[in-house]
Image: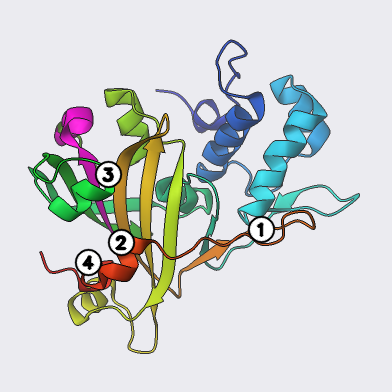
Amino acid sequence: MGTLDDVIRATELDRQAGTPLWVQLLSDLRRRLGAGEFTDAFPGELTLVGEYGVSRHTVREALRRLRDEGLVVAGRGRPPRLASPTEIAQPLGTPYSLFQSVEATGRVQRSVVRTLDVRADGVVAARLGLEESTPLVHLERLRLADEKPLAIDRVWLPERLAAPLLDVDFGRTALYEEYAARCGIRVTGGHEHLRAVVPAPAERELLGIPLDVAAFAIDRLGLAGGLPAEWRQTLVRGDRFSVTARFSPAEGYRMGDRPDSAATDPGRGLHDRRK
């Protein structure tokens, strides 16, 4: 059996892969953060350059993403250090994994699987660009962080793509990792609609939300190779979750319009869905 050092040490980056080195480095740093390696101190740029054998530009790009996600704090002329998060933060504009974001804060992520089956849903199928009777793999989980309720997560995937996932135990694994490993489907983009909602009584009870706390409802269409591969609805406790966004003088702060489906079909919102 390997030691803790064997588990959390740096992973060699694959220079033959099609994935940019900074993306691989970012993924490995998230993994090591989640494993608790950097509790005493976070390595500086030059240390990471030597450890991974990459350029300072590659390291800086990965560190910039960690800063955007609220996991690392760094200022001009100062070495990076771990942030001290009081909540779980998610960046806007990236295909993030809630599993990885929770684990990167040092918390333990676990899910209670409430539903994993195949069903038809005409509205969801239409959002995926499919015929209404198309079979869909449906996964519903209660997401926990350190055994405390964080989110209710409902996902629909085309069965022709996701059938192998029916045998997966999603209690302690990430959907995107299993989707890629078992089905060859990598969610690399898409779009989201995020809004503040008042949870229904049953969902408030499931999440343990006090009466004075609202929640975020997040609708996501995930794309793989530019084609729809996932429709997801997530309800997250507002007191344990935040979102971050980047802006620039050239582009300003970019906000999307409310999707037509949400505007014309409010009864299908996550917080009042009856199934």
Characterize the local packing of mark 2: few (<14), some (14-19) or many (20 or more) Cα atoms within 10 angstroms. few
Disc 1 and disc 3: Cα gap in Å?
Answer: 38 Å
**Number of dots carrying numbers:** 4
Q: Nearer the viewer, mark 2 or mark 4?
A: 2
Q: Which mark is residue 128?
A: 3
Q: Amino acid under label 2? A: Ser
Estimate the x, y position of residue 81 in percent, counting from the top left.
Answer: 73, 51
Report the disc number at residue 268. Answer: 4
Q: Which residue is mark 2?
A: 261
Identify the mark nearer the N-term, 2 or 1: 1
Compared across the picture, whether 255 is left or right of 191 comes to: right
Left or right, 67 with reference to 263 = right
For marks 4 and 1 on the same chain, the one whose residue lies earlier in the sequence: 1
Q: Furthest-bottom residue in view?
A: 212
Q: In the structure shown, which secondary structural element does the residue marked by tag 3 occupy?
A: loop
Indicate the colouring scheme. Answer: rainbow
Q: CA distance from mark 3 to mark 4?
A: 15 Å
Q: Identify the residue at image location x=62%, y=24%.
A: 20
Q: Marks 1 and 2: in contact by CB < 8 Å?
A: no
Asked whether 163 falls inside the magenta stretch, the response is: yes
Query: Of residues 100 and 92, which is closer to you in this image?
Result: 92
Identify the element where label 2 is drawn.
Answer: helix
Mark 2 and mark 4 lie on one chain; the one further toward the N terminus is 2
Spatial separation of the CA atoms under disc 2 and disc 3:
12 Å
Alpha carbon separation for disc pair 2 and 1: 38 Å
Give the label on residue 70, or none: none
Looking at the rendering, the stretch of residues picked out in magenta corresponds to 152-166
Residue 83, disc: 1
Q: Earlier in the sequence, mark 3 or mark 4?
A: 3
Nearest to the eye among marks 4 and 1: give it: 4
Q: Which residue occupies 20% across, 35% down?
A: 168
